[in-house]
Image (cartoon, coloured by chain):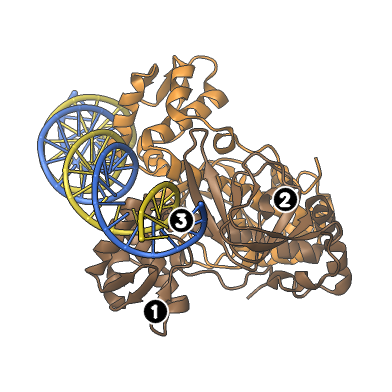
Chain colours: A orange, B brown, C blue, D yellow
Amino acid sequence: MKLKDIEPLRQVKLLADLDDAQLERLSRGAYLQRFPKGTVLFDPGDSPDFLHVLLEGAVELIGRTSGARETTIQILWPVDCFIPAAALTSTPYLMAARTLEPSQILMLEASNLRRCVREDAGLASIMIALLAGQFREMVRQVKDLKLRTGTQRLACFLLRLWDETGEGGAARLPFSKGTLASRLGMTAENLSRAFRNLEQAGLEVRGSRIVVRDRDKLEAICCLDALIDKQDAALSVQDR
Amino acid sequence: MKLKDIEPLRQVKLLADLDDAQLERLSRGAYLQRFPKGTVLFDPGDSPDFLHVLLEGAVELIGRTSGARETTIQILWPVDCFIPAAALTSTPYLMAARTLEPSQILMLEASNLRRCVREDAGLASIMIALLAGQFREMVRQVKDLKLRTGTQRLACFLLRLWDETGEGGAARLPFSKGTLASRLGMTAENLSRAFRNLEQAGLEVRGSRIVVRDRDKLEAICCLDALIDKQDAALSVQDR
DNA sequence: GCCATCCTTTGATTTCGATCAAGCGGCGCA
DNA sequence: TGCGCCGCTTGATCGAAATCAAAGGATGGC
């Protein structure tokens, strides 16, 4: 399905400041499509023909080795783009992408995007902010993996979840525990045990419902670090 | 020491295509400086006033937690830039930087860089390629950490080193084993044991001299993966 | 309602890596 | 020459996480 109008693009926060003409150029050769849950959008090694924009649903980015082992590297929520680093430089994907939920995805033609970026410094600055944010997210993950234990990673994840959604009563895990385990770099078995450990620290778990009874105790466990755990605010190529 | 001319900038491969006027603008408020070994250039949380360009020597980027634990996230060689993601978006560093060797470093004023990027789509495209490459490097590291054991990471590191420098006889570790251990996400003790294990796979280690006697056996151990282990070629915002 | 399937939990065991402790060897320096 | 420091190695022990095996528990289809 070809894109009829530029409205969907308006949902992308980073693109909000572009004018109609810029958005029109950007959306040439674009598709808006729905995918059922579990659809593989691309595999590692594929060459990127589109920049994907997730408008509805959820997508996981997956790393693989030849030995069939795989791990969830990132989980994306609307509205987010993937994977600009590959699409902008026309280099093979390092990760696979698979929908975790029925999803609506806007696909911008990569070659057209590259042309727009080469000609339009404003759009280029937006892409720079996007890439910088994604780089920083990966740096955070490396720090998380190398400096913390599995239980600590879980505790930090839960605290962030709690602060974002759980304030009033209970938070809800936004995906399966198997996926969470993979995202945190542990097995499903160990994730289960980690939850059990955290119950001694005032955490309440029933299915995917989470209640943090004692925030301080949980913080003490995971040695929360503002630079790892706080998301960046909206980035831009501006002085501040 | 203020920058007298734009010659040093010519050494940065990504900037090679810029003309004199562009380079002159970019180098306004720039410094060229030498630092002894072990100098801390900045700490996590600092706000980035410069984009650093390493012209000579070596620099390590370090992640820390509040608990004083630290890990080497990346080791940089000439000519490379750090850290564009922070400098371009004016967000606090997530890592510290420390010289591993006496180093010569070019420091481009960040606010001037941001101005140049906003106005110059060509320069912006170069920064996009730079950021994309760094993002991909971090993705590779996450895959490396989550999908391989310490010994496998070492084997892969050595194979890459061997292919780059060791062909004729012996390769030489470019930094101390302690630093290598931290970079690979293991302790110095375990690194030592990992070397011992690999000696059963036809590896020869004497001090920092390495000889790969049986490349195939080593490859079999580390399940080499082209997408993790091969460096990207020169990136750009071009079709290919 | 019932069955098949998938997700999750639990226990037992093994592997891997961190930590602790001690010893070796080189190097700079008084 | 002798001393102390630092980087590296080695062994012993501890803790964390992976693996293997099995059993609940939820879910969706028929």
The amino acid beneath tag 2 is Ala
* Depth check, front residue: A233 or D10: D10
Examine the rendered structure and indicate whether residue A102 appears above or below residue B229: above
Question: Which of the image's four quarters has the N terminus of chain A?
Answer: bottom right
Q: Going 37% across and 37% down the picture, which residue do you hit?
A: A150
The amino acid beneath tag 3 is Thr
- Alpha-carbon distance for marks 2 and 3? 26 Å
- Alpha-carbon distance for marks 2 and 1? 39 Å
Q: Which mark, by number, is residue B87?
A: 2
Name the residue beneath numbered marker 1: B170
* Mark 3 element type: helix
Mark 1, other Cα within 10 Å: few <14 / some 14–19 / many ≥20: some
* Mark 1 element type: loop
Examine the rendered structure and indicate whether residue B162 appears above or below residue B221: below
**Residue A109 visible in this rendered orientation of the protein:** no
Point out residue A116 in the picture as x, y percentages from the top left corner.
76, 63
Whether residue B158 sits left or right of residue B139 in the image: it is left
Q: Which mark, by number, is residue B179?
A: 3
**Residue A88 visible in this rendered orientation of the protein:** yes
Q: Looking at the image, is mark 2 or mark 3 nearer the viewer?
A: 3
CB of mark 2 within 8 Å of CB of mark 3?
no
Q: First in sequence: mark 2 or mark 3?
A: 2
Mark 3, other Cα within 10 Å: few <14 / some 14–19 / many ≥20: some
Name the subunit of mark 2.
Answer: B
Disc 3 and disc 1 on one polypeptide chain: yes
